[in-house]
Image (spheres, rainbow, N blue to C red):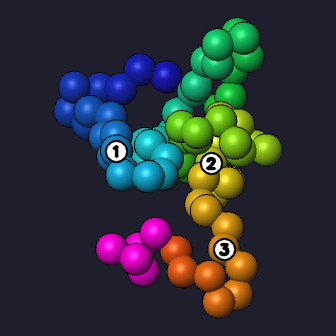
Amino acid sequence: MPNSSEHPCRITIGDDGPLLVEGPVEVTCADGTVAVSDRFVVALCMCRRSRMYPWCDTSHRRRTQPGEKSRRDTG
């Protein structure tokens, strides 16, 4: 699925999350498997914790217990 020069592929890099890629996309994984999505934006897992790898399932988010402060609350 090549991108045309008129519409280059946009990739957004977040601080602590997935890569957001404008689709449709075809992803070739390290083991040679190919994952395809025709969605307009896909989230690619960068932490490898996702059960749906290479797609992000938000497993990168730190899970907190009720009453526990997150990293964002302590800054």
Q: Secondary structure at mark 2?
A: loop
Q: Residues within 10 Å of mark 1 (few under 14, many from 20)?
A: few
Q: Are marks 3 and 1 in contact (CB under 8 Å)?
A: no
Could you tell me which residue is drawn at 33 percent across and 74 percent down? 75
Is 6 left, or right, of 46 in this rendering? left
Which circle's residue, 2 or 3, is located before the other in the chain?
2
For label 2, count other residues whose C-alpha is less than 10 Å away and answer few (under 14), some (14-19) or many (20+): many
Relative vertical location of residue 21 with respect to residue 69 in this rendering, above or below: above
| Nearer to us in this view, 53 or 7 | 53
Q: Residues within 10 Å of mark 3 (few under 14, many from 20)?
A: few
Magenta residue span: 71-75
Q: Please give the name of the residue rendered at 29% of the width and 26% of the height, measured from the top-left corner.
A: 4
Please identify the dominant SS of the magenta region.
helix
Residues under labels 1 and 2: Cα distance? 13 Å
**Residue 32, position as x, y percentages in the image:** 70, 10
Say if residue 7 shows up in the picture. yes
Residue 53 in the image, given as x and y percentages of width and height: 71, 37
Residue farthest to the top? Answer: 32
Image quadrant where residue 65 sits: bottom right
Indicate the amino acid at tag 3. Thr
Dot 3 falls on a residue whose secondary structure is loop
Between marks 3 and 1 in the image, the one whose residue lies nearer the viewer:
3
Q: Which residue ends up furthest to the left in the rendered image?
A: 6
Q: Nearer the viewer, residue 43 or 9?
A: 43
Q: Quadrant of residue 63?
A: bottom right
Q: Residue 64: which numbered mark, if any?
A: 3
Residue identifier under label 1: 13
Mark 3 vs 1, N-terminal side: 1
Question: Which kind of residue does numbered mark 1 sit on?
Answer: Ile
Residue in view at x 44 percent, y 43 percent? 19
Residue 56's disc is 2
